[in-house]
Image (cartoon, coloured by chain):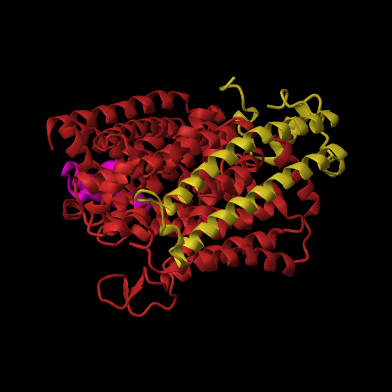
Amino acid sequence: MNATVIIIFLVIVAMTLVITYYAAKRTNSASDFYTAGGGLTGWQNGLAIAGDYLSAASFLGIAGSIALFGFDGFLFSIGYLVAYLVVLFVVAEPLRNLGKYTLADMINARFNAKKVRGAAALSSITIVIFYMIAQLVGAGALIQLLFGIDYLWAVLLVGFMMTIYVLFGGMTATSWVQIIKAVLLMIGTVILSFLVLQRFDFSILEMFAQVKTATPHGEAFLNPGVKYKIPLDTISLMLALVLGTAGLPHILMRFFTVRDAKTARSSVMWATWIVGIFYVMTIFLGFGAAAFVGSETIISTNPAGNMAAPLLAQALGGDILMSFISAVAFATILAVVAGLVLTGASAFAHDIYGQIIKKGQATERQQMLAARYASVGVSVFSIILAIFAQSLNVAFLVSLAFCIAASANLPVIVYTIFWKKFNTTGAISAILTGLVSALVLVSIGPSVMNPEAGVAIITGTPLFPLTNPAIVSIPLGFLGGVVGTLLSKEANEKKFSEVNVRANTGGFRQL
Amino acid sequence: MAKTATGNNVSVPATGQDKAKIATNKREAGHIPDFEAIEASASFRELMKKKKAFLISTTVLFLGLYLLFNLVISYTDWLSAPFIGDISWVWVFAFGLFAMTWILVTVYMKRASKFDEMAHDTLKEFNYDEEENR
């Protein structure tokens, strides 16, 4: 670790702590804690969504994947981006109009049943935990590579920082850490893209021509099929990505931080441009790394290709640029995990403690205390899990999180808003069917069961052939909602009128 | 604006408190609006008709194109044919999906401001003041 790295690293840490200090002064109520008082503007929230969404896996992982696998490395980005249309068209505005702090609030605007809230909180917590382990284990490994700190200390460092932001600064601090990270990430990516394009004389044709001969894959590098060779598996995964974003609780939570549906809408617009432009630039980063670093060097530093972007920075801009990119990666990790802690805490403290146990009668002080205890609890729990999961291959956990989000959360959201006959039993059964089928199918699939000893958790032939079960579990989630609804005689049509009017007009929020 | 924007800054999850709040709201005066009447009104039905027509057609379009793209690249190598130089069609279509996303977002933003106006009219018709209730 050289002096530049340490200085840039400390500047970022100091900056986020200053934000947390000022945010802490403004965090005086549960609403401040969970939603930053609902006062973010469209562009602020748009940047924060991008900051929440573009994890280190996106930044380092996708750049590395493109460097090693060409087009197939880029494929996921298409799903990650198109997904925002589902977010914009289906969930963003009704969520803002109906909910308060969590997804369960929105569903309960229609049902007001503890069991529905409990089921929604359970699926949110499951998604957050899986996502979080993936992020923390990834973060530990990355920081180990970037700064040469031991895995254990790296996880503890990230864990400590995220706890501080959330505990003291709540959503205000988390949002601003995400906004700053998004800006830094874009600056870093623009600089790297510019340097790469400069080397190709700003000709995209020239870039493709050189990359074609730069990798061991030759021409195949520029076309699909290098990495994903099982069609049904690829389609299933792409389905999880496009439908999952609209069910990710930490993304959904960002729509409560704005004042109305109009602002929620414009924040999605901002996020779509930022995220999309970022993904386009990862192509330049990936191709640049393939051409100017070389796959041998990339793989020898880290087999998954995670070091492609920092190595590219080193090759094009020397130590200073490499330090800057490493620091950006660190900020990226912090912003994402802080958002996850807050989301997990809201499910525990607001849904389970505040609404189910205290029946919505908790005082402001009790709500704040619960939120803070829950934040520490979620942080400590995930840090411990991450420490034990170090040697596990956690790459599949993120796609599993998307799969659960698409299977357990999306059906219930769609039915709540659009289906008049939908009822309490249907809601519970939609969530649980989606959640359980996704979990079971993954645990009997190739990510958990592998015939080769030591590759996966269980040695044996997988009982389910697909790595990502979305193509089965999403229809099951939707089906579960229908079956549950038809099995119960309960009618909810009067309440649907209310939800329909409120979701589509934005009026009568205080009811 | 930003700080005072949310009426729910004073957090009131409890139904008891909610009732108290509605009662203090001078115009609402303790009565719950007739949502079925609003839902049945001509202006609201017009809003929903326009909104659904837009959302259903665009959703079918973008999900259809997205799935088609994935099916084609997974099962065929049609898109591996060259477009210009070493750039194959797959990049053109991939970027096409990016462009589609940005275009649909932009179109929706315009449409949605019309929906906002219609929603505003419906609320006004039923004497609900948006500004007062923020």
From what the image shows, is residue A400 above or below residue A58? below
Asked whether the viewer can see residue A20, the reply is: yes
Q: Residue at x 19, y 33 (%)?
A: A317
Residue A80 rendering spot, x and y as whole percentages? 46, 49
Tell me which secondary structure the magenta stretch mostly adopts: helix
Q: Position of residue A496 (x, y in %)?
A: 76, 50
Q: Quadrant of residue A427?
A: bottom right
Q: Residue at x 48, y 52 (%)?
A: A79
**Lateral position of residue B119 relative to residue A241, left or right:** right
Disc tally is: 0
Q: Which residues are magenta?
A: A132-159
Q: Would residue B115 be counted in the magenta stretch? A: no
Question: What is the x, y in percent for residue B52?
Answer: 73, 47
Q: Is residue A306 above or below residue B78?
A: above
From this viewpoint, which residue is outermost toward the left? A2
Q: Nearer the viewer, residue A486 or A56?
A: A56
Q: Position of residue A466 (x, y in %)?
A: 44, 70
- Does the segment drawn in magenta span residue A145? yes
The C terminus of chain A, quarter of image: top right
Q: In the picture shown, does residue A380 fall above or below A323?
A: below
Drawing shade for chain B:
yellow
Residue A75 higher or lower than B110, as above or below: below
- Identity of the residue drawn at 82% across and 40% down: B46
Q: The chain coloured red carries which letter?
A: A
Which quarter of the rendering shows the N terminus of chain A? top left
Based on the displayed image, in which of its 4 quarters is residue B68 positioned? bottom right
**Left or right for A269, reference B88:** right
